[in-house]
Image (cartoon, rainbow, N blue to C red):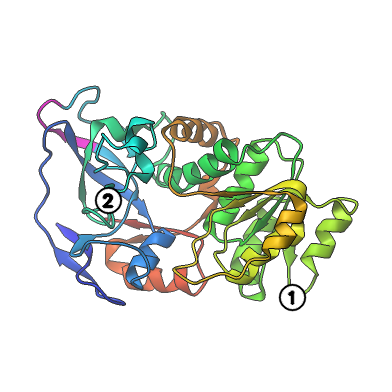
Amino acid sequence: MQALVKTQKGIGYLELQEKPEPKPGVGEVLIEVKACGICGTDVHVKHDQFPYWPPVILGHEFAGEVVELGPEAEGIEVGARVVGEPHTQHCGHCYLCRTGNVQICAMKRSPGWGIDGAFAKYLVMPTKLLHRMPNGMSFDEAAVVEPTANCVTDIVERARLQAGDFVVVLGPGPIGLLSALTAKAAGARHVAIVGTPADEAVRLSKARELGLDTVLNLAETDPVEAVMDLTNGLGADMVIECSGAPPAIASTVKYVRKLGKICAIGLTGGTAVQFPWDDAMKKVCELIFNLSTQYTSWDRTIALIASGQLPAGEVISHREPLANWEKVFEDVEELRALKALLIP
């Protein structure tokens, strides 16, 4: 089968290769991948800015169909349409695993960076990590369940957004847009999203199309002043940082109200960040760091997307065959794409 492989350590080293079709082991199934999204993690792996174990097939935001059962694969059948949590090789016995936090187990090796992923025709997954797609949900929509589940985990379950909150999202990339939609679905009264001039043509345009309450280009409007005007000088109940840009991270404290919350989602790629610590202390605000998805967020996310309350599929901008990966990655990195899907 053809697969997109990170062949060795270093910047670049991505290429299409012929790989043998995998075989499911005990408790596993073989999945024919129907669509897989390009994640910021895939871009970070390309640029040697995220842990990975080459040679490895990239891709973890997948949707597909079960085509073969391994020994003792229970609770699923051939033909099932599924998505899956990318927490494949957690240890199962550390304090994190035993408290239900397998997503941050130090031994976790996920598809796409720790073990072979879904930028290929076939993927092996354990049945315990699979979730069924509802009738009527397309494979394209299902391929954005995983990034959306990150937003639901971070914003709803960990940062505990409350109905009626005023929310500011920094960074209008795919995760920023999905975060804004998640906040709306969770009952935020007003969602403002902030971007740069480079975001204007595609990302901020999509934010307006999605009907977000306030869309701010920081080159045209002082976004902090705008938020203060909209909140009568109080500040935002929650600031969701999705850009990973050090200046944006530092600015979160300016937006948030006293006793408000900063929900950190964006990764910097390893860049150190200067942060106004004393200003944050004086506001007595909460800073919530996040990584990966909790089990409980998956079925909630699937239900929100299937019901139309969280139209995650609207952020898909590219749907291309795997052979076109170079052009699609280029569009993602040059901000000409939102959520891009590769079809093996």
Numbered circle sitting on residue 20: none
Q: Are marks 1 and 2 in contact (CB under 8 Å)?
A: no
The type of residue carrying mark 2 is: Pro
Name the spot of residue 240 as percent of width and height, x first.
63, 52
Q: What residue do we see at 61% from left, 62% from top?
A: 171
Q: Residues in magenta?
A: 66-72
Which residue sits at x=51%, y=47%? 313
Which quadrant holds residue 247?
bottom right
Secondary structure of residue under mark 2: loop
Quadrant for the C terminus, please: bottom left
Residue lying furthest top in this view?
Answer: 75
Q: Residue extending furthest right?
A: 232
Res 124 quadrant in image: top left
Q: Residues within 10 Å of mark 2 (few under 14, many from 20)?
A: many
Residue for point 36% across, 62% down: 42
- Distance between the alpha carbons at the discs numbered 1 and 2: 39 Å
* Residue type, numbered disc 1: Ala
Residue for badge 2:
111
* Residue 284 in picture, x, y percent from top left: 73, 49
The image position of residue 265, as x and y in percent, is 54, 54
- 69 is higher (above) or lower (below) than 250: above
**Secondary structure under the numbered disc 1 in the rendered image:** loop
The residue tagged 1 is: 219
**Which quarter of the figure is the N terminus placed in?**
bottom left
The answer to whether residue 265 is left or right of residue 269 is right
